[in-house]
Amino acid sequence: MADFSLGLVEVSALGNAIIMLDDMLKAADVEFVATERRLGGRLVTIVVRGELTSVQASVDAGVARAKQDECLKAYQVIARPHDEILKFLHLEPESEPEPEPESETAGTHVGPAPENEEETERRTSRRRTAQKQKTADAAAEKKPAPRRRGRKPKTEDTSAK
């Protein structure tokens, strides 16, 4: 079983869901983990996770906003959800980190040494300068627009009157 809680709120319209999610995240210390859109975004479910009290406060804030906007469809808080529910929401429990290699050769770096920040900035600056130069050269070499073919525009002939 998970050591956190999940909160789900379903509303109509994607715009309403975004506004409601903003209120939910500001109300409590929760993490936005998933969204489910159905019917082309006309029905949207927002999923947050965190401690039970934080999730409850967040869902309450979302429900209040959704009721204010008259778009609430459903809501639920699940305390310590089962691992199978996490699979359903594509939130599989985090696997244990891979053990560190035991031999020194397995952990040695292969390839060029990592650069420091100054070298990275110098290379980026050189690339930008070269790109600006190419743009300036291309603008200088720009050919004049080709002459227009076809009939000449009519001009008023004042002497014929």
Image (tube, rainbow, N blue to C red):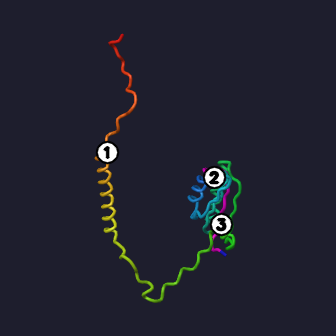
Residue at the far top: name it.
161
The residue carrying mark 3 is 89
* Identity of the residue drawn at 36% across and 76% down: 112
Q: Quadrant of residue 17?
A: bottom right
The answer to which of 17 and 95 lies nearer the viewer is 95
Q: CA distance from mark 1 to mark 3?
A: 55 Å
The residue carrying mark 2 is 65
> Of the residues shown, which amino acid type is indicated by label 1?
Lys
Mark 3, secondary structure of its residue: loop
The answer to whether residue 18 is above or below residue 149 is: below
Q: Quadrant of the N terminus?
A: bottom right
Q: CA distance from mark 2 to mark 3?
A: 24 Å
Q: Nearer the viewer, mark 2 or mark 3?
A: 3
Q: Position of residue 12 (x, y in %)?
A: 67, 51
Nearer-N-terminus badge (1/3): 3
Q: CA distance from mark 2 to mark 1?
A: 57 Å
Q: Quadrant of the C terminus?
A: top left
Q: Is 142 on the left-hand or right-hand side of 43?
A: left
Mark 1, secondary structure of its residue: loop
Q: Is disc 3 surrounded by few (<14), some (14 to 19) or many (20+) residues within 10 Å?
A: few
Q: Quadrant of residue 145?
A: top left
Is residue 5 one of those drawn in magenta? yes
Q: Which residues are magenta?
A: 2-15
Q: Quadrant of residue 115?
A: bottom left
Is residue 79 one of those drawn in magenta? no
Nearer-N-terminus badge (2/1): 2
The answer to whether residue 95 is above or below residue 127 is: below
The answer to whether residue 117 is above or below residue 138 is: below
The residue carrying mark 1 is 142
Q: Nearer the viewer, mark 1 or mark 3?
A: 1
* Identity of the residue drawn at 49% across and 84% down: 100
Q: Is 21 on the left-hand or right-hand side of 79?
A: left
